[in-house]
Amino acid sequence: MLNLILFGPPGAGKGTQSEKILSQYGLKHISTGDLLRAERSAGTDLGNKANDFISKGELVPDAVVIGMVKNYMTENVDANGFIFDGFPRTIAQAEALDSMLQEFNTEISIVLGLEVEEDELVKRLLLRGETSGRADDQNEETIRNRFQEYLNKTLPIQNYYSEKNKYNGVVGIGDIDEIFSQLCSHLDKF
Ligand code: AMP
């Protein structure tokens, strides 16, 4: 199995690059943001509770997202591997992911981090907000809050995987296909 974490701050291009990687490597895509938005659209309890956090740019509690990922993986036991996009976002989530993968007799193969600075991210997200229909992309304060959450809670994960020799950073600014080929050069080693 090839299990990839596509890591990086909001707006770094994780969704765009995930789409390209999926079609090339035949992996299953797990985007916790997409799963949460689907719950919200379906009007489930989980979706309604998550919406309070999403609209403020805060992280949804760990137990909620970990449960969703576990369900998704259990429903896709035959997959060749997974791309984790927007998950894990806390050390607790990273530890939970390690144990889940262990239950499936597998592990994280590699973590690829798209590295983009804050002002560029804010610009990109506000632009995306004009067409994405996502309220959390339309308000600069919410965007900056998402970035703060990233710095405080998510960035420590980079170290977590560096210590396991699994983290590789890639410059996330420039031509989309060029960035994709940088990612492929890492993935082709597996
Ligand atoms: P995204 O689509 O990945 O930008 O996520 C949008 C929002 O969903 C985030 O700002 C969080 O509120 C929530 N979210 C998505 N993934 C996670 C996660 N792994 N842990 C906690 N909250 C999450």
Image (spheres, helix red, strand yellow):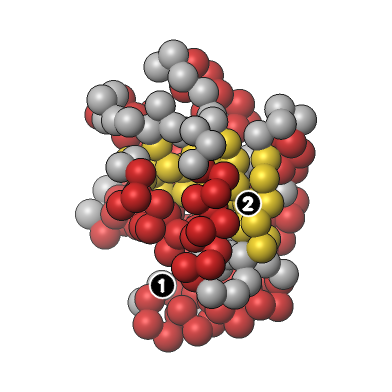
Depicted 164 relative to depicted 90: above or below: above
Task: Give the spatial CA distance, label 1 vs label 2.
Answer: 24 Å
Can you tell which quarter of the image residue 116 is in? bottom right
**Between 85 and 183, which is closer to the camera in this rendering?**
183
Question: Callout 1: helix, strand or loop?
Answer: loop
Residue type of the residue flagged with mark 2: Gly
Give the x, y percent position of residue 139. Answer: 55, 79
* Residue appearing at x 45%, y 80% in the figure: 129
Image depth: mark 1 or mark 2 in front: 2
Horizontally, residue 187 falls left or right of residue 24, namely right
* Residue appearing at x 38%, y 58% in the figure: 20
Residue for badge 2: 113
* Residue appearing at x 72%, y 69% in the figure: 117
Question: Callout 2: helix, strand or loop?
Answer: strand
**Between 22 and 137, which is closer to the camera in this rendering?**
22
Q: Residue 112 got which mark?
A: none
Give the x, y percent position of residue 91. Answer: 66, 35
Can you tell which quarter of the image residue 179 is in? bottom right
Depicted 148 relative to depicted 134: above or below: above
Label 2, residues with CA under 10 Å away: few <14, some 14-19, many ≥20: many
Depicted 179 relative to depicted 161: above or below: below
Residue for badge 1: 134
Depicted 143 relative to depicted 18: above or below: below
Mark 1 C-beta to ligand 1 under 8 Å: yes
Horizontally, residue 91 falls left or right of residue 179, namely right
